Each structure stands twice: as structure tokens, then as C-alpha cells.
């Protein structure tokens, strides 16, 4: 059986050109449409990855209005379609306008069959790669569904998720270490939901956000009249988490004095509310997080070592977003879909410059920063596509210049490119090597050198 040829939709009103284009390419199945209605019917029926579009269509064969109307509709019906626009002689302006509206490329009439063939082939290849990436991304998110809303396709992060799943049903205490915005709270919730305590409460307390003198009462609760202002008996967070999970966020910010009291709870699993002498047993799973260097704090005496070992039976290090190649774009697309649906439904995707900028930015604020930038961009975007400027992202080149050490910069670049190629070829060594323009043995050497796996 011969493989199905990829479809090319040619939107062109000149019957002579229609006939010429229809038979010009052996490797595509060419579908022809002469006006807006038949073009959109063909788009829906055939779902061609690539469309060539003459901007001058009836009833406006000498202008561009009808062509742009078709382009707009294609972009809203199937935004992943690669549209190659044909413009009249010297119509650079309409070409640029078409690109801004989401067209993939343009060429100037008169038609040069060979040149268009090249553009179309490149567009087909790009469409195929993007399609593969979408499938891969969908698969990755499905695989990780266990951990709630977490989205990732990066091996570093999948490993983290696996660890969390594996320890979920034990009672060991888990310490999550990661820079701000890396997803510590999301993982803590995921851990709770994956555990057999998921019917109980998930109680989070941010130890850095509560004034020192109130933190004790927040954690342990108090009896009525225990101190001025204690007008009624109140349960603390620890007690509220009975039967569930207690998430101690920014645990490095607990003052020393309170560390002693927390340690006692962890050893004896009973608490006393402030102002009470009776012990209340509490059964809760402890998860904590911090962005601080607790080992250094232990060194200088501001964090108790014995408490550290109680809290950190398992330590999970969460990689920064920049250390998860591919994830920024994957997450950005997911956030865009979510925010567009909520706040600006006409936004359909990212322009190419936005994707490039997202891919190279170093994301100091990690996923939180990405989420915020995409949210603001979706609100601010004028057109269907969010561009780099909407995201307020710097020129990619400034980023590369930041890498001071040439060897490590090269190594990082190598790793990144190899990982992207592996993902795109779904781990197939031959096609990865081909994509990278190197031989298979060279690829094997690099994989070994960088400890990467297909
Ligand atoms: N892998 C992910 N997939 C989807 N959303 C994520 C992911 N990681 C983080 N987020 C989202 O990014 C935001 C920041 O995550 P989270 O609050 O868990 O980070 P954090 O490490 O606790 O940050 P901070 O240090 O600022 O408290 C949240 O809105 C969260 O839902
Ligand atoms: Mg947090």
C-alpha cells in the first residue's frame, strides 16, 4: 500500500493557474478552491496541513480584503494550518500584514512552481513536527495526571513526580526544596491527593507570612483567655490537619523557640493548645518546603539539626524551570489555553517569535513568572497570536551573551538541542541524528557524554 500523500489546499481563482498547480506536485494531493466558501469547505473536509492562498479573490480580485477574510477564518478554525500567501507584484505591505495575522510565509506572483514547492515542503515538515510535539505533550500530561494539575514532559520533573507518587502512601515526612515558583505547593497538594489521606484535609501554612508572635497560636491553637485577645478557643493548623496532610511552607522561617515545640510534636505526635495542659493526639502527614539553604542555617545555628532530620526523611529537589528544556513552551501553551478561555477567547496561540523567546528566557521566577507573563499577555494581546512583545521578553541574543563560560555554554546548548530533537523524533535515534545533521555513532557518543537517554 502506498502511504497517503499530504494534502495541499490551493486557493486560487484563476482557472489557468488552478490547472497548472493541480498537477505540479507529485508528492502532494492537491485540492483546489476558487473562492472563500469552497476554500473553507475544503479546509474542514480535508484538513490540509498547508494552504496556499491568493489574496486577490472574488468579489475583490484586485484587492486583498477577501483573501484576508479567508486567512482570518482559517486561523480561527484551524490555527495550526500553515498558510502561504500569494501577493501581487510589490505588495510587501500586505505580505507583512498576512504574517502578522498568522500566515506562515508568502511569495510574490508571478507563480514559480519550484519555489512554491520548496516553501510548501518546509511548511509541511514544520506542521508534521508540531503535530508530533502536540501528541507528545498530550501524552506527557496524560501520564502525569496522577499528580493533579502538574504539566511536564521533562525527565527531571517526571522523576520528581515518580518519587512523590512512590512515597505518597507512606507516612514519611517530605521536604521539598526549590526556588520560588517551581511548584512546591502544587507538588505538596499532589502528594496529598495521591496518598490514602486524600479524604482528609490538606492544610497549608506559610510560616514566613505570619508574624512571629502569632505563629505559635496559628500552629498549635489556643484556649479562650490564654492571652489578651484570645476571645474564644481556637484549633491550630496542626489539629485541623488531623487525618490529612500539613504543609509547612517556608519552614526555614520558624523561629528557634518554636522549632523546639514543633520538634516535640513530631516526636510525640500530641499537641497542647496555648493555655491548656491537656494533650491532644494528632495524626497528620508532614510535608514542608523552603527556598532557604537549611544546611547553612544549621551551620550558623539558626535551624535545629534534629528538627531538620525529622522533617526531611525524604528530600525532593525541584529543578528550576530553565533546567527543564521544552517545559517552558509546553506550560506556556497550556496556560494560554486556560487564560484565553477565561479572559480573551479570540487569542488562539503564540507567534513564532514568542515561542523562541519563551524557549531561551532563563525564567528566574520559574513557573509562577511564566504563568503571570502569559496571563498578562493574553489580556493585552490585540490579535489572535501572542507575540514576544506582549510577553515583555528580552531579545534572545542578550540571553546567550549572559553565558560566560564558553565550554559550559556549549555543553548546555548541545544538551538542549539533543533533547529537543529526541523529543521531536519520539526517541528514534536515526531520525534524531538526521535532524541534528550528525551520524548515529556521533549521537551515541554525545548521549553517553551527557548522560542522556533516548
Ligand atoms: N508543572 C506545573 N504544571 C502546571 N502548573 C504549575 C506547575 N508548576 C507550577 N505551576 C503553577 O505555578 C504557580 C506557582 O506554583 P507553586 O505555588 O506551587 O510554586 P511554589 O514553589 O510554591 O512558589 P513560591 O515559592 O512562590 O511559593 C501555581 O499557580 C501553580 O499552579
Ligand atoms: Mg509556595
Image (cartoon, grey):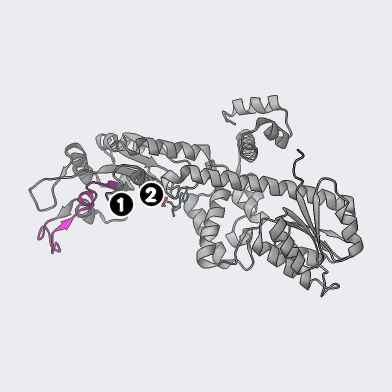
Residue located farthest toward the front when viewing the structure as drawn: 1
Are the residues at dot 1 and dot 2 in contact (C-beta closer than 8 Å)? yes
Q: Looking at mark 1, is its residue's CB closer than 8 Å to ligand 2? A: no
Quarter that holds the C terminus? top right
Q: Is residue 355 left or right of residue 120?
A: left
Marks 1 and 2, how far apart in space? Answer: 9 Å
Nearer to us in this view, 16 or 1:
1
Nearer to us in this view, 376 or 32:
32
Q: Position of residue 433 (x, y in %)?
A: 70, 32
User: Which quarter of the figure has residue 446?
Assistant: top right
Q: Residue at x 78, y 53 (%)?
A: 8
Q: Earlier in the sequence, mark 1 or mark 2?
A: 2
Q: Is residue 152 visible?
A: no
| Circle 2 crowding by C-alpha within 10 Å: few under 14, some 14–19, many from 20 | some
Quarter that holds the N terminus? top right
Q: Position of residue 48 (x, y in %)?
A: 73, 54
Residue span colored magenta: 223-246
Q: How many marks?
A: 2
Q: Which mark is residue 185?
A: 2
Nearer to us in this view, 141 or 432:
141
Q: Is residue 347 left or right of residue 436?
A: left
Q: Is residue 305 left or right of residue 270?
A: right
Amino acid at each position: 500500500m502506498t502511504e497517503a500523500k499530504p494534502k495541499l489546499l490551493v486557493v486560487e481563482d484563476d482557472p489557468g493557474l488552478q490547472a497548472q498547480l493541480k498537477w505540479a506536485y507529485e508528492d502532494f494531493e492537491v485540492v483546489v478552491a476558487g473562492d472563500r466558501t469552497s476554500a473553507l469547505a475544503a479546509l474542514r473536509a480535508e484538513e490540509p496541513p498547508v494552504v496556499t492562498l491568493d489574496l486577490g479573490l472574488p468579489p475583490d480580485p484586485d484587492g486583498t480584503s477577501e483573501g484576508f477574510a479567508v486567512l482570518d477564518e482559517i486561523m480561527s478554525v484551524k490555527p495550526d494550518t500553515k498558510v502561504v500567501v500569494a501577493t501581487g507584484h510589490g505588495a510587501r505591505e500586505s505580505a507583512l500584514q498576512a504574517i502578522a495575522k498568522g500566515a506562515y510565509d508568502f511569495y510574490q506572483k508571478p507563480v514559480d512552481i519550484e519555489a512554491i514547492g520548496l516553501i510548501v515542503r518546509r511548511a509541511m515538515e514544520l506542521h508534521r513536527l508540531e503535530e508530533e510535539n502536540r501528541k507528545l505533550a498530550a501524552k506527557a500530561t496524560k501520564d502525569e495526571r496522577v499528580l493533579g494539575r502538574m504539566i511536564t514532559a521533562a525527565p527531571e520533573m517526571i522523576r520528581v513526580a515518580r518519587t512523590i507518587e512512590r512515597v505518597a502512601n507512606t507516612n514519611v515526612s517530605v521536604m521539598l526544596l526549590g526556588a520560588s515558583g517551581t511548584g512546591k505547593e502544587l507538588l505538596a497538594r499532589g502528594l496529598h491527593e495521591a496518598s490514602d489521606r486524600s479524604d482528609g484535609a490538606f492544610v497549608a501554612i506559610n510560616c514566613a507570612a505570619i508574624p512571629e508572635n502569632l505563629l505559635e497560636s496559628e500552629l498549635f491553637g489556643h484556649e479562650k483567655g490564654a492571652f489578651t485577645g484570645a476571645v474564644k478557643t481556637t484549633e491550630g493548623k496542626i489539629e485541623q490537619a488531623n487525618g490529612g496532610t500539613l504543609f509547612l511552607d517556608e519552614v526555614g522561617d520558624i523561629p528557634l523557640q518554636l522549632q523546639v515545640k514543633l520538634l516535640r510534636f513530631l516526636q510525640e505526635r500530641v499537641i497542647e493548645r496555648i493555655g491548656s495542659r491537656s494533650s491532644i493526639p494528632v495524626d497528620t502527614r508532614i510535608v514542608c518546603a523552603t527556598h532557604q539553604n537549611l544546611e547553612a542555617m544549621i551551620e550558623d545555628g539558626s535551624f535545629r539539626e534534629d528538627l531538620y532530620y525529622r522533617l526531611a526523611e525524604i528530600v525532593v529537589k525541584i529543578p528550576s524551570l530553565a533546567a527543564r528544556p521544552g517545559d517552558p513552551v509546553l506550560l506556556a501553551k497550556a496556560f494560554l489555553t486556560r487564560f484565553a478561555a477565561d479572559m480573551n477567547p479570540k487569542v488562539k496561540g503564540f507567534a513564532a517569535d514568542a515561542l523562541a523567546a519563551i524557549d531561551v528566557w532563563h525564567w528566574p521566577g520559574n513557573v509562577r513568572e511564566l504563568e503571570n507573563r502569559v496571563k498578562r499577555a493574553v489580556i493585552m494581546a490585540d490579535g489572535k497570536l501572542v507575540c514576544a512583545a506582549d510577553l515583555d521578553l528580552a531579545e534572545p541574543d542578550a540571553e546567550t551573551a549572559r553565558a560566560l563560560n564558553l565550554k559550559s555554554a556549549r555543553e548546555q546548548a548541545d544538551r538542549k538541542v539533543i533533547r529537543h530533537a529526541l523529543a521531536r523524533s519520539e526517541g528514534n535515534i536515526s531520525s534524531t541524528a538526521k535532524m541534528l545533521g550528525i551520524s548515529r555513532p556521533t549521537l551515541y557518543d554525545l548521549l553517553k557524554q551527557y548522560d542522556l537517554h533516548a
